[in-house]
Amino acid sequence: MVMRRSENDPAKRLGQVGIADRHLRPKVHVDPDRSRSWLRRVLPVLGAHRLSLSGALGMSFLTLMLQVQIPSLLNGAVSNSLERHSTPLDHYVWIVFGLALGAGLAGFGSRYLLMRTAYAVEFDLRNLLYEHLTRMGFDFYDRVQSGQLISRANSDIRSVNLYLTFGPNILVQCSIAIVAFIYMLTINVPLAFVAMSTLPFVFWLSIRMRASMFPVSWLIQARLAEVATVVDENVNGVRVVKSFTAEQRELDHLAREAAKLRWAYIRDADLRARFSPVVQNLPQLGMAFVLLIGGLLVIDDHLGVGAILAFSIYIVMLQAPFQMLGMLVMLGQRAAASAQRIYEILDEEPSVRDAPDAIDLPEVRGEVRFDHVNFHYGADADDHPDGTAASAAHSPLGAAVAGPPVLSDFNLHLAPGETVAMVGRTASGKSTVSRLLTRFYDVTGGAITIDGHDLRTLTLQSVRRHVGVVLDEPFLFSVSIAANIAYGAPDASREAIVAAARAAGADEFISALPDGYDTVVGERGYTLSGGQRQRVAIARTLLVNPPVLILDDATSAVDVQVEQAIHEGLKVLMAGRTTLIVAHRLSTIHLADRVVLLDGGRIVAEGTHAELMESTPLYGEVLAQVAENEPSGAPA
Ligand SMILES: Nc1ncnc2c1ncn2[C@@H]1O[C@H](COP(=O)(O)OP(=O)(O)OP(=O)(O)O)[C@@H](O)[C@H]1O
Ligand SMILES: [Mg+2]
């Protein structure tokens, strides 16, 4: 029989529960005061769920209160029903039955509420972290490995969450020891002390365990992240790995990291193996004491047999919470280590962010000015003028390293609607100029203005909405081509998408694909050729229709004929738009009103192509260099 897939698919059958398709800004926060303990800092997150958490704890307490009466009732049943026959047995049976039923129901409620709280806290923490990551600047991602971020967002959040939600529950369970102790006192005072005598040792051992296990927990988390980083790089860099047949080397690399992780885990197991059996078996020792002392009391007729039964059950009952107390200590170690690793991320301030009084530019004419701009990468490593070093300089995630100056006293003016080509040797800083104009990084000196507004006085959103950039390495998402083109304008109509593709010279090849615009591209767009990717990326930026457009080597991977087609489309679109083209080809340069030559971190010459050929030998050299890579080199 053929089953329909939808019936078979558990995801479809169960449906999606509680998934909102919009990210809601997390309402919670982590205390930014770094001098506080990790637990104090995360309390606001727990506080947001105090209702369900206290409900869970209350129910948990109720469960235990019901359970704790049972041994004492058994004592009564043995004495009153079995020995003295003063109370009918079914009296006790019904009460125990009722208590068990009540405890079962309350147990359900407490577990359900506790898990609910746990997942809500995990959800909040993860959102908090992701939201912070989206605010971080490019310098952060330059420095931090994505494997580190992934492991912190997964295993570290989980271990903090476990401790936060199960910790209080374990404490509640231990608090029941007091109630049990009171019950035991009502039966027999000396025996109650004998029964409880081993518990302080359990606690003391837990503390000892804490001291020795903490460094290992930290090591495990750190090494998990390192393994994740190797795996991540191998998956993303699989094409490089395979083309250099470096599989074996990478496997060795992974094996080395995995062996380090294994060492830490074994160390952890070793410590646990030393402590756990002692912690677990101490209560049995208590049982032996109870049997000895209690037995003597029974023989001397000071105590009923039922009391020994009740005490034994109490000791078994207390065993679990006190063992869990040991686990709590262990969870605490791991949570403290994990929280520290999460705070390392949360405590990093984004280097590029909205000023408190940043304004939104509704409309832009497109006048761009670079005014005595200085720039070098890793500016966070610099000491700030007020003497305080920026957070990134000492970040455990990877310290910022101040690079050499890339731009120094860089001046450039683009009139509204003007198209300027920027030419320069490789690594002269051309891409850097475009990254500064989109405010991926802040200048380290001077200023960049749009329509006279310093970029730093505008909201990031308005800068990036008005300045469109086609990066030199186009990144596509694994969605349809249409969705990739519409990335910046998700509501765009199909006509607008096709028009943008046409202008970017991409319509022809897209239409030839089996699914046309609905073709889903592979991860990062790897199922398209480099030139095809570039054209999709151009269409994506054109669709947003930004008044200032930067094309950073955007047509480097297409041949001259295709480039010609793109230029036809661009000529129309560039009209009225301020455009900065990073150019390597003469054909591209001809699109521009003016050419500037970048060298040594500043503009050293500018003019038309012919003027520069005439006046500046370096310009000819740079172009000749490029022309060598260009067999079909456009005519000079
Ligand atoms: N994220 C970064 N962190 C640190 N240094 C960087 C970073 N990006 C670029 N650099 C350095 O800045 C300098 C300028 O790089 P840039 O990418 O701007 O050159 P380019 O002119 O675009 O070169 P190409 O023509 O090869 O694309 C180079 O020396 C480079 O090593
Ligand atoms: Mg570049």
Image (cartoon, helix red, strand yellow):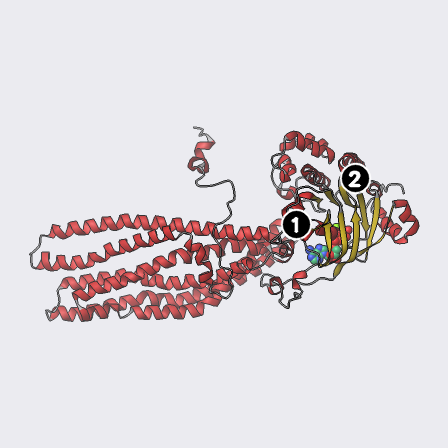
Q: Residues within 10 Å of mark 2 (few under 14, many from 20)?
A: few
Q: In this view of the protein, which residue sits in the foreground, 596 or 205? A: 596
Element class at badge 1: loop
Q: Callout 2, which amino acid?
A: Asp
Total number of numbered labels?
A: 2
Element class at badge 2: loop
Q: Is 569 drawn above or below residue 25 in the view shown? A: above
Tell me residue 204's x, y (percent).
Answer: 35, 71
Which residue position holds label 2? 559
Using residue 396 as the reference point, say whether residue 281 is left or right of it. left
Q: Quadrant of residue 76?
A: bottom left
Using residue 612 as the reference point, say whether residue 383 is left or right of it. left
Q: Disc 2 versus disc 1: distance between alpha carbons?
A: 39 Å
Using residue 566 as the reference point, say whether residue 178 is left or right of it. left
* Label disc, if present, on residue 27 of the rendered structure: none
Tell me residue 499's x, y (percent).
Answer: 70, 31
Tell me residue 58's x, y (percent).
Answer: 31, 54
Q: Is 614 drawn above or below residue 264 in the view shown? A: above
Q: Residues within 10 Å of mark 1 (few under 14, many from 20)?
A: many
Q: Callout 1, which amino acid?
A: Leu
Q: Quadrant of the C terminus?
A: top right
Q: Residue at x 65, y 65 (%)?
A: 384
Which residue position holds label 1? 458
Tell me residue 163's x, y (percent).
Answer: 41, 58
Q: In this view of the protein, which residue sits in the foreground, 628 or 464? A: 464
* Residue lying at the far top of the rendered structure: 1
